[in-house]
Structures are given as C-alpha cells and as structure tokens.
Image (tube, rainbow, N blue to C red):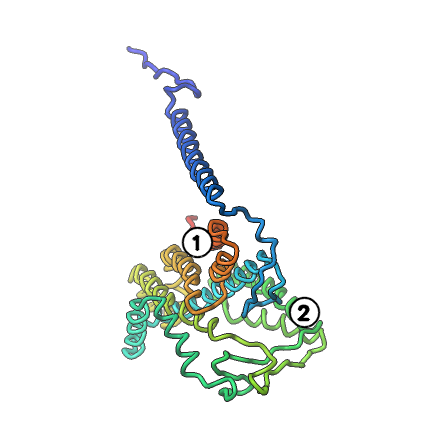
Amino acid sequence: MTTPVSPPKVRRWSWRSQAFRGLVYQAVALAVIGFAIWYLAHNTLINMRERGIQSGFDFLTQTAGFDIGESLFPFDSSEHYWKAFLVGLVNTLRVAVLGILLTTLIGTLIGVGRFSRNALIRGLCSAYVEFFRNVPILLQLLMWYLLFTELLPDTLEPWVIGPTFLSKGGLSYPIPIWTLGHALAVVGLFAGVVAAWLYRRWAFRQFEATGRIRSMFWVPVVIVLAGGVLGWLVGGAPMAMNAPKQGEFAVEGGGSLTPEFMAVLLGLTVYTAAFVAEVVRAGIQSVARGQSEAASALGLGRGQEMRLVMLPQALRVIIPPLTNQYLNLTKNSSLAVAIGYPDVVSIANTALNQTGRAVECIAIVMIIYLCTSLITSLLMNWYNARAAIKER
C-alpha cells in the first residue's frame, strides 16, 4: 500500500505563492497609477507657472464680486467664493433631491399603469414613455423654460390662483412666519417618523407570526402627520402667514419659485420618470406569472396584488437600474446652466471667468458630483441589501 504524497508547502511570502505574487502585482499597479497622476499634475503646474497662470485654491477666500439670483440663504457680492460655491451646491441638491422624489412617484405610477386593464390608461402611459425618453433632455429644459417665460403673463398682471400668483417672474405662494410652534412641529414630524418606523417593524413581525395584514402605508402616514400636528398645537398653533401681494412693479412677499428652477425641476422629472417607468415595468414583468395567479387565488384585488405581491418581489430587480437613473438625474442637473439656473456649474463658470482658475473650478465641480454620486450609490446599495430576498 502506497503512502499518499502531500504537495510541497509553499511559504506565504515566497514568490511561488500565488497570493504573494498577486499582492506584488497590485502594489506595482498602484505605484504606476500614482506616478502617472503625480507626473501629470506636476507637469501641468510647471506649464502653468511658465505661462504666468496662477494656480491654487486661495481664491476661495477672496470676494466673489457677483450676486446670485436664487439662494436659500442670504448672499451678496461682498461674500467669498467658497460661499458662492456653497450656494451652487445647495441649489444643485435642491433640484436633485426633489427631482428624485417626484421621479420615483411619477415613474412608479406610469410603470404600474402600463399593466392597467384600461386601454386608455395603458396607451397614455406608453405614449408618455415613448415621447419623453426619446426627446433630448436639453431640448426639454428649453421647452419648459420657454413655456414659463413666454406663455405666462407679465409680473404686473399675474394669474391669481387662490393665494398664489403665477407669472413670468415665477410662482409666489404664502409661507408661515417662523415661530416656536413651527419648530416644535418639525420636532413632532421627526418623532412621528421614528414612531412610524417602530410601527412598521411591529406590523411586519405580527404579519410573520399571524399572517394578518396591517396597513404599512396609511397608518405610518397618519402617525407622522399626527406628530407634526401635536407639536404645532403644543407650540400654540401659530397661524400667521407671510402671503404674497401684488406690488407696484412685481409680486412682493411670500415664498417664490423662479421660472428657471421650475423648468429644471419639471424637465429633469418628466424626462427621468420615463426611464424609471420602464425600469418598474421590467421589474414587474420579471416576477413569475404564477405569483399573480396565486394572489388572485387568495382573493386579492388588483391593487393589493400589485402592492403586496408583485412590487415587493420586483424591487430586487428594480433597485440597481433605478440607482443609475438617480445618478443620471443628479448629473443631468448640470445642464441647468443652459437656462440660467445658478447651480454649481453656473457658479463655477462665473468664478472661472473672473479668476482664471480653470483647473481648480473644474476640480471643485468634479469633486462635488463625485461625492453626491457616491453618497447616492451608498444609500441605494444599503436599501438594496435590505430589500433583497433572504434565505432562511
């Protein structure tokens, strides 16, 4: 009987070790990439210095010298460049966050509408998708901007819709005069969100234990709203409003949305929603037909079938491409510069023309979009992990 011969042992740090060779190759690759980046940056700085071109980010602490027409916090020409870039970042996030929320809502409704038994609804949803996703986004932004600036009445004769005013100057609407009651209402909303999250966890555990279905949407919504109303009542139920009114030359007071902001938001929303609708449609179609038949056999209605059976299973297919659409919406917001919306790209262009720091301004814009995209991807990957089907 022959004794089996064991393979020769390979030392961990020996060149004969595949793992060790892999580490060496990776280290060499990183060194080459690092050297290439250093060489390009060093060569660029030398060429700029020889041509008398200033470089560096010290300009961020200099006075900007220009005003920004739209900002969520005060800004004037005496402020520094870094604050101007902050205004641009906030304006970009304002469009991106609202656009993602509206796109998700509209895209989901249209995607589900593609499965409607009503031929009219199904046809309108298909027409929406085919029209808006095949027209370039820049043209859609220009279309909405022209609609707001050419077809609406002058600021001296705005359309009055209840307490709001709509004209070429934008949409003016009443806003509450901030008091302690409003702060407590915000605190109540956050407390309601926590309570709604705890309720959903309890309702899900009860469903797994008993099979009894409890409301996972309307009850949490009522809890959140009740928290806000309770905080508002504790704070004295303030009712004072800053309402807009027609002035001598324009509408004064209240809050306002500029035509540029509304054009960017609507353009990005309706364009991206067409792609989101197709993502939702594909995700629903990926669910086995037997699931729909089983839901019908259990006596579930059409709406319950879609909400409780089809969409939860389709999420694992929907979320990855949906993340791409969110990233596209955020990056497409850079096209807002074409219609004069002061996003981060518009601010960077102005700063570049005044300071000549082209490399620095472009680098700031690239870093901002890189960080927003990575954060969006991180959040969506976390949600994707939670929505994935887990084996018992």
Q: Nearer the viewer, residue 186 or 261?
A: 261
**Relative to residue 193, is residue 154 drawn left or right?**
left
Q: Secondary structure at mark 2?
A: helix
Q: Residue at x 43, y 66 (%)?
A: 336
Amino acid marked by disc 1: Asn
Q: Label 2 neighbourhood size at 10 Å, few (<14), some (14-19), many (20+)?
A: some
Compute the Cα span from label 2 to label 1.
Answer: 34 Å
The disc label shown at residue 188, or none: none
**Which quadrant holds residue 325?**
bottom left
The disc label shown at residue 384, or none: 1
Q: Nearer the viewer, residue 305 or 149?
A: 149
Would you name the residue on which mark 2 appears?
183
Q: Nearer the viewer, residue 76 or 295?
A: 76
Image coordinates of residue 5 in percent, x first then y, are: 32, 14
Image coordinates of residue 47 in percent, x first then y, are: 44, 41
Image coordinates of residue 227 in percent, x first then y, are: 63, 70
Q: Judge whether 243 appears above or below 281 on screen.
A: below
Image coordinates of residue 209 in percent, x first then y, are: 50, 58
Q: Residue at x 44, y 35 (%)?
A: 34
Q: How many numbered marks have been drawn onto this rendered protein structure?
A: 2
Which sits earlier in the primary sequence, circle 2 or circle 1?
Answer: 2
Q: Residue at x 34, y 60 (%)?
A: 283
Amino acid marked by disc 2: Ala
Q: Secondary structure at mark 1?
A: helix
Q: Residue at x 37, y 64 (%)?
A: 276
- Residue 66: in sight, yes or no? yes
